[in-house]
Amino acid sequence: MTVAGSARSTAHLADPISRWLADVLSEPDTAWEDWDQGRPAILRTGVRFDAVRMHPDLVHAAVGHTSPEAVAAVLAVALTGPVICHPGVWYYALVPAQTSET
């Protein structure tokens, strides 16, 4: 089943996290299309959140693990917000907007 005028499935509509992330764009369907095609979406920071980019070597050294499951478990306890992982490339900790200005 699809949403009228869009190729995205209605399963996306039930995911509040994806909706919250996509809604930072003036055209949220751009993010949905990227995700539907298996591509990362480019999300605008500074509105709802900022992102702190962290190199995997630094994250793995800090948490003492390299397996995705172990890293996720440690970060879930150590950080108070979400982390997006681009495997083998970067981790992005999402922090409140304008965090660097406070």
Image (tube, grey):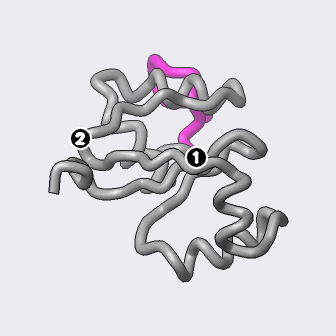
Of the image marks 2 and 1, the number of the one nearer the N terminus: 1
Q: Is residue 37 found left or right of 8 in the rendered image?
A: right
Taking the view exactly as shown, the residue that stands out farthest to the top is 5
Q: Quadrant of residue 39?
A: top right
Q: Position of residue 17 (x, y in %)?
A: 45, 54
Question: Is residue 64 shown above or below 94?
Answer: below
Question: Is residue 54 shown above or below 72?
Answer: above
Mark 2 in CB contact with mark 1 (< 8 angstroms): no
Circle on res. 47: 2
Q: Quadrant of the N terminus?
A: top right
Circle on res. 11: 1
**Which residues are the magenta region?**
1-11
Look at the image and say whether residue 54 sits in the magenta stretch.
no
Look at the image and say whether residue 9 sits in the magenta stretch.
yes
Q: Amino acid at mark 2?
A: Val
Q: Amino acid at mark 1?
A: Ala
Q: Quadrant of the C terminus?
A: bottom left
Q: Residue at x 75, y 75 (%)?
A: 64
For label 2, count other residues whose C-alpha is less than 10 Å away and answer few (under 14), some (14-19) or many (20+). Answer: few
Which SS class for mark 1?
A: helix
Determine the CA span between mark 2 and mark 1: 25 Å
Which SS class for mark 2?
A: loop
* Secondary structure predominantly adopted by residues drawn in magenta: loop
Q: Residue at x 42, y 32 (%)?
A: 43
For label 1, count other residues whose C-alpha is less than 10 Å away and answer few (under 14), some (14-19) or many (20+). Answer: few
Q: Position of residue 60 (x, y in %)?
A: 73, 63
Looking at the image, is mark 2 or mark 1 nearer the viewer? 2
Taking the view exactly as shown, the residue that stands out farthest to the right is 67
Q: Position of residue 3 (x, y in %)?
A: 49, 30
Q: Quadrant of residue 24?
A: top left
